[in-house]
């Protein structure tokens, strides 16, 4: 028996559909992702904490869920929104259907709504606070409750999803355990500061020959440098970069001291550390087909993206080199301070999900480390 569900937006829009997943209520910022595949990687991306994700593709769940494909141990998104969900997946790797996976992990979802209309609303009005409800509450009551949901601006969500203890990561993209010398026989000791890191990033670092240690987001720069790493990466993560307590000061203390790479939230934090500013995008960039141009050579990558904030290019003038731009809207997608051996990108070079065009950036980071040479650990 199907159970009715309602999606209510703070702007007053109501969508009636069918419950998919757990029953109850889900609150958060309603956003949309245009990727045609990779629903599991999207739902398990820690950057989606506090967000209700709308999938614009006509049907999701066709190939089921294979647990190893997750970017975290369980779904991280606050809620699930779709036009149609497949309940009988067809794929030899499938271990569980998407609806059952959502239900088992307590993720409230809704299907059967007009997602095209919803996306038009979000593009016009911007990402909206919203509620998915299966209790039968009135539309007006849900709208009023949606209005009380706080904006993403000012929220330090990265500190909430970060690991509490340091750990080593040794699994590559093909589930090959690497030793400390890595795949290439070289020792590159890399510390990843976890603001909500995806497993795909860690796997790509292992693939290029890095021995990876993941540390909490509030780890001091002094402690990180005392470990004498060969490189440091600032990871992706959710929420407002300007609200992540102490992150800009931590990053500023690392710049110029060790080869440094930032991804997504890490890119934004490095922008702040350099004295720049960030701002909230109207509806964000979330999808697997965003064209990005590398300005130095004109090379264009199709990229996987998931962010709601961006760096202000004017605030970075004289502080950093803008290296990449988004060809859809001209926003900053990459920066570098070459003399400090630091670079960062706004998009996700590890794909997961999406195209592989930008994986070379992990090799670029490894080459940067090799140029620096191993740090003495005496």
Image: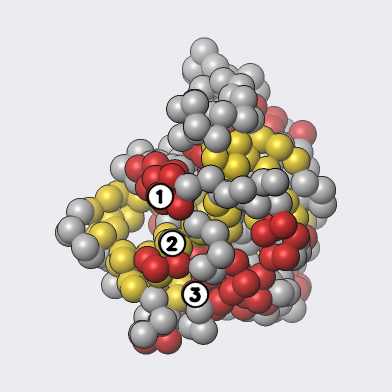
**How far is mark 3 from mark 1, CA to CA?**
24 Å
Give me the residue at 75% from left, 60% from top: 223
Residue 96: image location, x then y, percent: 65, 23
Name the residue at 55% across, 35% down.
187
- In the rendered view, does 81 fall on the left or right side of 296? right
**Residue picked out by circle 2:** 341
Q: Residue at x 50, y 57 (%)?
A: 259
Q: CA distance from mark 1 to mark 2?
A: 9 Å
**38 left or right of 194 in image:** left
Up-down: is 114 above or below 39? below
Q: Is the residue marked by circle 2 packed among few (<14), some (14-19), or many (20+) residues within 10 Å? A: many
What number is the disc on residue 271?
Answer: 3
Residue 91: give x, y in percent of width and height: 50, 17
Q: Earlier in the sequence, mark 1 or mark 2?
A: 2
**Nearest the eye: 254 or 60:** 254
- Place of residue 36 in the rendered image (x, y in percent of width and height, measured from the top left): 40, 41
Which of pointers 1 and 2 indicates the residue nearer the eye? Answer: 1
Instruction: Tell me the crowding category of disc 3: few under 14, some 14 to 19, or many 20 or more residues within 10 angstroms, Cα based.
Output: many
Residue farthest left in this picture: 298
What secondary structure is found at the residue carrying circle 3?
Answer: helix
Compared across the picture, whether 165 is left or right of 250 comes to right
Residue 74 visible at all: yes
Dot 2 or dot 3, earlier in sequence = 3
Q: Mark yes or no: residue 131 visible.
A: no
Q: Which residue is denoted by mark 1 in the rendering? A: 371
Nearer to the camera, 229 or 284: 229
Are the residues tagged 2 and 3 within 8 Å (C-beta)? no
Rendered image quadrant of residue 366: top left
Name the residue located 46 percent from the left edge and 73 percent from the top edge.
Answer: 310
């Amino acid at each position: 028996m199907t159970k009715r569900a309602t999606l209510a937006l703070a702007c007053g829009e109501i969508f009636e559909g069918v419950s998919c997943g757990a029953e109850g209520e889900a609150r958060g910022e309603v956003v949309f992702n245009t990727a045609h595949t990779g629903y599991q990687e999207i739902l398990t991306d820690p950057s989606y904490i506090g967000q209700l994700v709308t999938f614009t593709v006509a049907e999701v769940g066709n190939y089921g869920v294979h647990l190893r494909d997750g970017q975290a141990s369980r779904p991280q998104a606050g809620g699930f929104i779709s036009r149609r969900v497949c309940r009988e997946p067809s794929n030899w790797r499938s271990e569980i259907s998407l609806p059952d996976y959502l239900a088992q992990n307590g993720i409230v979802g809704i299907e059967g709504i007009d997602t095209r209309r919803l996306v038009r609303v979000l593009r016009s009005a911007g990402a909206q606070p919203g509620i998915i409800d299966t209790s039968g509450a009135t539309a007006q009551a849900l709208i009023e409750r949606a209005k009380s949901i706080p904006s993403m601006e000012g929220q330090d969500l990265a500190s909430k999803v970060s690991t509490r203890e340091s750990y080593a990561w040794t699994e590559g993209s093909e589930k090959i355990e690497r030793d400390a010398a890595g795949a290439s026989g070289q020792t590159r000791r890399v510390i990843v500061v976890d603001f909500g890191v995806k497993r795909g990033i860690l796997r790509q670092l292992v693939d290029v020959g890095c021995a990876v240690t993941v540390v909490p987001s509030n780890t001091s720069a002094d402690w990180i440098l005392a470990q004498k790493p060969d490189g440091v990466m600032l990871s992706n993560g959710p929420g407002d970069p300007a609200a992540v307590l102490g992150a800009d000061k931590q990053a500023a203390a690392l710049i110029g001291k060790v080869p440094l790479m930032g991804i997504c939230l890490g890119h934004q934090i490095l922008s702040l550390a350099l004295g720049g500013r960030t701002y909230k995008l109207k509806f964000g960039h979330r999808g697997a087909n965003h064209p990005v141009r590398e300005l130095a050579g004109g090379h264009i990558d199709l990229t996987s993206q998931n962010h709601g904030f961006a760096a202000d290019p004017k605030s970075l003038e004289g502080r950093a080199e803008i290296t990449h731009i988004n060809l859809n809207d001209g926003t900053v997608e990459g920066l570098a301070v070459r003399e400090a051996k630091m670079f960062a990108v706004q998009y996700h070079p590890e794909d997961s999900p999406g195209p592989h065009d930008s994986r070379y950036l992990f090799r670029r980071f490894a080459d940067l480390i090799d140029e620096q040479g191993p740090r003495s650990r005496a």
